[in-house]
Amino acid sequence: MADRETSKPSTHRIRLVGPWELRSLGVGESALSSPLRVWPTEPGNYPLGESHFGETHSEIVLTRRFNLPTGISPADCLTWEAEFSVPPQQIVLNDVVLGVTLELQESGTYRICSQSLMQLLLPGQNRFDVRLKIPASFESALLIQSELVFRPLSD
């Protein structure tokens, strides 16, 4: 019992796999009338026609909703770590633009780590919106991984 009390709290990871909602920011025929549910971790899983992925770059928004994780307190640290195959243009949590670090990995992917999210979380459902510009002829997975990382800081 004493070992449990003296051990440091561990880091917990909550995967935000999917499905995510995909909305096109195109105009006219290239715009989507309603969001599509997609698994952006799967290559080519974007049911958009050539009008979306033509000669120009297409802009989309990926949205993922999640509930407030249980067992956390305002003193704890909760960040979002993700890896994308294209660099995000903007990342928003509950209508607040996040400050993130963006690193280009040797694999050619982009790793993201957010600021602490505790002050931005809502008691009920929360929402990430990730704005991406997709290159023409894109056939890869957009999102490689997405996790909430919870580091308890309370005693």
Image (spheres, helix red, strand yellow):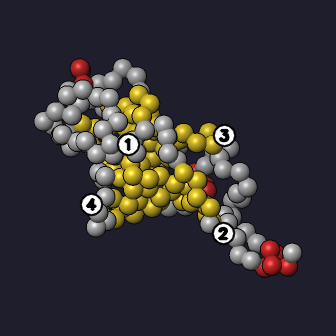
Rendered image: mark on residue 124 = 3
- Alpha-carbon neighbours of circle 4 within 10 Å: few (<14), some, or many (≥20)? few
Label 3, residues with CA under 10 Å away: few <14, some 14-19, many ≥20: few
Counting from the top left corner in percent of width and height, residue 87 is at 30, 53
Whether residue 90 sits left or right of residue 55 in the image: it is right
In the displayed image of the protein, which residue is found farthest to the left?
55
Of 138 and 123, the residue lying toward us:
138
Taking the view exactly as shown, the residue that stands out farthest to the right is 1
Q: Which residue is mark 4?
A: 108
Does residue 68 appear to the left or right of 80 in the view shown?
right
Q: Type of residue at label 1?
A: Glu
State the residue at coordinates (73%, 55%): 71
Q: Give residue 10's mark.
A: 2
**Given the image, on which type of amino acid does mark 2 rest?**
Ser
* Relative depth, front residue between 32 and 98: 32
Which is more N-terminal, label 3 or label 2? 2
Residue type at mark 3?
Answer: Gly
* Cβ–Cβ under 8 Å for marks 3 and 1: no
Q: Whole-Å distance between the Cαs marked 1 and 2?
A: 30 Å
Count of residue discs: 4
Dot 1 or dot 2, earlier in sequence: 2
Mark 4 vs mark 1: which is more N-terminal? 1
Looking at the rendered structure, which numbered label has been put on residue 42? Answer: 1
